[in-house]
Image (spheres, rainbow, N blue to C red):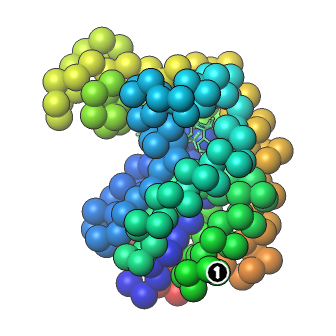
Amino acid sequence: MAVSRIVLLGPPGSGKGTQGKRLAAECGMPQISTGDLLRRAVKAGTELGQMAQRYMNAGQLVPDDVMLGLIREVLANAASSGFILDGFPRTIAQAEGLDVMLVEIVQPVQRALLLDVDGEVLVRRISGRRVCANCGTNQAPAADGTPAAVGTRCPNCGGELIQRDDDREETVRKRLGVYDQQTAPVVAYYAAQRKLARVDGDQPVDDVYAAMLSALSN
Ligand code: AP5
């Protein structure tokens, strides 16, 4: 695949993490999820984590200057082998800051993939999401759509399955509102740069992945 510097865009629950991890594993590029980085900082109780937790639990974005500092550090190690950015940039200020950083190292974003999914589907998906408190893996619901029970064990590592603090329905709806106000303009930003491809994210996971590969090879 010729494209190696990719931004994954899409509302909360659209499948960025699911697809980003698979793309990273199959294409040998690092997936950089700012949500995962922040959750690790929260778990470790660092200064960044304590500050970020307040915003995350309220369904709000962590301030741009903090996020730009974090991504600058990560990209300093990763940019030469390409990257899949998941959950960053989320504001126009972050998109512009990222462009400035990447121009400095002559590694511009090549493609932005938007995973398109309707809001009510997202609320249902996220309210039923269960993640492992230890390894962070998503536990898919049963075939009839029933989510795994909170407190049961992760099949990968035996850790406890929990609901993310920001996955309660009320917070999910706030996050969707924040996406519409602050992140949707980033879609237009990449469209204006002629880097945007839209993928229907409301289909089975394998079909979404195939559509992404096709968008990346065109
Ligand atoms: P973050 O962790 O990035 O959350 P998000 O963008 O809201 O995305 P999610 O992790 O909820 O969903 P996803 O799109 O990855 O979907 P997933 O694959 O898990 O950020 C959390 C918070 O951190 C933010 O609210 C903010 O406070 C802060 N933050 C992070 N980055 C920031 C930044 N740049 N600036 C400022 N603040 C920042 O899938 C969801 C569920 O659906 C799963 O259960 C999955 O199994 C299921 N699923 C996936 N695909 C399908 C499918 N095709 N069909 C059916 N089910 C599916």
How dense is the environment of label 1, judged by Cα within 10 Å: few (below 14), some, or many (20 and up)?
few
On the image, the x and y values in percent for residue 182 come to 79, 47
- Which residue corresponds to the image point at 60% horizontal and 75% vertical from the top-left? 102
Residue that appears at 35% across and 14% down: 150
Dot 1 lies on which element?
helix
Q: Amino acid at mark 1?
A: Val
Q: Residue at x 37, y 76 (%)?
A: 81
Viewer-nearest residue: 176 or 94: 94
Tell me if I can see residue 124 in this picture. Answer: no
Q: Is residue 165 left or right of residue 210?
A: right
Residue 81 is left or right of residue 153, and the answer is right
Disc 1 Cβ-to-ligand 1 distance below 8 Å: no
**Residue under circle 1?**
103
On screen, residue 190 versus residue 16, left or right, reads right
Looking at the figure, which quarter contains the N terminus?
bottom left
Look at 47% across and 50% down and name the residue there.
33
Q: Position of residue 183 (x, y in %)?
A: 74, 51
Residue 11 percent coordinates (x, y)? 64, 46
Most extreme residue toward the top is: 151
Q: Quadrant of residue 139?
A: top left
107 or 6, nearer to the observer: 107
Q: Is residue 76 visible?
A: yes
